[in-house]
Amino acid sequence: ATDDSSMVFDNTALPDVMTKLIDHYHTPIVFNKAELSDMYFSGQVLESDSLSVILKVIANMNGLKITQTTDGFMVHSSKE
């Protein structure tokens, strides 16, 4: 049985992770699909985790930057 209160990612491509997070938290996350397509995330997201915390974890693992926007977040490569 799957527990709806958590999401488990197993080497999931980041664009798919972002899409699931957007659906789950009903919060816009702006990202460049091509930029994230060769990045992956494995881990569990708990109901108690805030979106900003999860994004920071994913960003730290992949060398990305998270910017808070008026209505959500922006994820971008730090190689700018």
Image (tube, grey):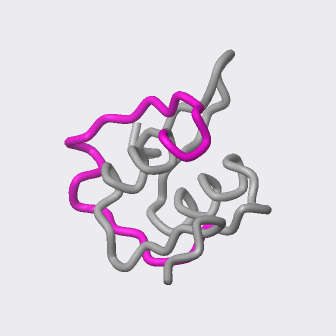
| Outermost bottom residue | 1
Placement of 69 over or under 49, stated as above or below: above
**Picture quarter containing residue 54?**
bottom right
Q: Is residue 24 left or right of residue 77?
A: right
Which residue occupies 61% across, 67% down?
A: 45
Which residue occupies 79% across, 62% down?
A: 48
Placement of 48 over or under 76, stated as above or below: below
Placement of 33 over or under 59, stated as above or below: above
Q: Is residue 25 left or right of residue 2?
A: right
Q: Which region shows up in magenta?
A: 23-45
The spot of residue 41 in percent (x, y) is: 41, 70
The spot of residue 26 in percent (x, y) is: 58, 34
> The C terminus is located in which quarter?
top left
The spot of residue 65 in percent (x, y) is: 54, 45
Q: How many marks?
A: 0
**Picture quarter containing residue 33?**
top left
**Picture quarter containing residue 44?**
bottom right
